[in-house]
Image (cartoon, rainbow, N blue to C red):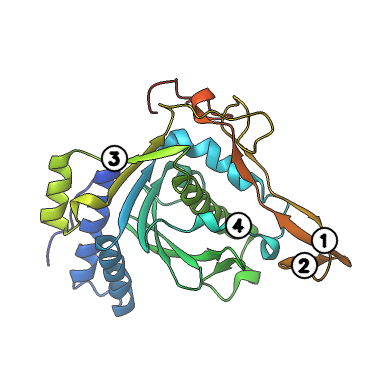
């Protein structure tokens, strides 16, 4: 039997992906009877997904901003959660490593793989070295959140909250990525590292993206604009307002009708990051 790869506990973005692929390939090709046919298919599906994905990394400097984004839903019932259309992934298939996920998952070196479907749904699966793929669920701007399992009502509260938080963190990350006024995307790792992945893992060189704050050129905004006025970047929470029953996308609660008003990013990172661990300084990316 082939010896299991030794990968240690490397935390780097590219190292984590390399370790995930090495371990998953070992399990897929293993003759160990503890792995069922379904298990091996699941590991193989992740490998093929990653090979076709665009690959994104958002580090710790985004953690508080993404937590701020998810806070807007803290008092909203799951069935009533609605999210922006800008949470659509930038590619049909993505692998995204978020430091923010570490707070809400017990998987070491966790990342998410996502897939976008033509009905607007984005599915989310968590992956990590030495861990089986963990199917979470998905989100859709029109219908809200959904989960792969059929026994959601029987889940313990901590599991339900963890899965929900992971879905919202991924959605918030993509909303930021889709807002180049606030962030920019640059090639991740060195050219030599990307060439190595192309040769050894069949992952094209052009799919790597490291996301950083776009703070080099402050944007002129005027008082009263939704963009803020010389303010640090922050998230204005969404909320439910009273609505008429014939309006689109309304929900009913206790005989009253409500419509979700989208939250939005305001200010600009050139003036700092509200609540951020690392507020970047003008003229350099975090």
Q: Which mark is residue 83?
A: 4
What's the residue at 16%, 51% (across, down)?
197
When the figure is inspected, residue 272 is found, relative to residue 176, above or below; the finding is above
What's the residue at 50%, 38% (across, down)?
63
Q: Nearer the viewer, mark 1 or mark 3?
A: 1
Q: Position of residue 280 (x, y in %)?
A: 45, 24
Residue on which the image places disc 1? 243
Mark 4 neighbour density, 10 Å: few (under 14) some (14–19) many (20 or more): many
Among the two numbered marks 1 and 3 on one chain, the one whose residue lies closer to the N terminus? 3
The answer to whether residue 98 is left or right of residue 70 is: left
Among the two numbered marks 2 and 3 on one chain, the one whose residue lies closer to the N terminus? 3
Mark 2 neighbour density, 10 Å: few (under 14) some (14–19) many (20 or more): few
Label 1 to label 2, Cα distance in Å?
A: 7 Å
The answer to whether residue 82 is left or right of residue 42 is: right
The front one of 144 and 269 is 269
Residue on which the image places disc 3? 12
Q: Which mark is residue 56?
A: none
Among the two numbered marks 2 and 4 on one chain, the one whose residue lies closer to the N terminus? 4
When the figure is inspected, residue 99 is found, relative to residue 217, above or below; the finding is below
Residue on which the image places disc 2? 247
Among the two numbered marks 3 and 4 on one chain, the one whose residue lies closer to the N terminus? 3
Q: Which quadrant does the C terminus fall into? A: top left
Q: Position of residue 3 (x, y in %)?
A: 13, 59
The front one of 29 and 210 is 210
Please tell me whether mark 1 sits on a helix, a strand or a loop: loop
């Amino acid at each position: 039997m082939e010896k299991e790869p030794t990968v240690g506990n490397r935390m780097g973005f590219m190292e984590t992906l390399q370790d995930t692929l090495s371990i998953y390939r070992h399990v897929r090709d293993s003759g160990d009877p503890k792995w069922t046919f379904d298990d091996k298919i699941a590991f193989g599906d992740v490998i093929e997904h990653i090979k076709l994905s665009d690959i994104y990394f958002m580090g710790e400097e985004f953690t508080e901003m993404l937590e701020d984004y998810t806070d807007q839903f803290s008092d909203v019932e799951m069935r009533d959660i609605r999210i922006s259309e800008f949470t659509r992934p930038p590619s049909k298939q993505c692998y995204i490593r978020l430091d923010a996920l570490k707070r809400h998952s017990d998987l070491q070196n966790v990342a998410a793989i996502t897939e976008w479907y033509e009905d607007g749904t984005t599915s989310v699966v968590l992956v990590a070295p030495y861990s089986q793929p963990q199917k979470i669920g998905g989100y859709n701007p029109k219908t809200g959140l959904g989960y792969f399992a059929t026994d959601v009502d029987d889940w313990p509260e901590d599991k339900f909250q963890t899965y929900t938080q992971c879905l919202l963190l991924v959605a918030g990350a993509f909303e930021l990525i889709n807002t180049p006024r606030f962030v920019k995307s640059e090639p991740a790792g060195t050219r030599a590292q990307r060439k190595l992945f192309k040769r050894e893992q069949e992952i094209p060189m052009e799919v790597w993206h490291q996301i950083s704050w776009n703070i080099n050129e402050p944007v002129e905004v005027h008082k009263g604009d939704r963009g803020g006025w010389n303010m640090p970047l922050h998230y204005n929470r969404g909320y439910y307002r009273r609505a008429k029953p014939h309006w689109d996308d309304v929900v009913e609660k206790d005989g009253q009708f409500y419509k979700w008003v989208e939250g939005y990013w305001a200010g600009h990172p050139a003036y700092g990051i509200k609540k951020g661990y690392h507020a970047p300084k003008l003229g350099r990316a975090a």
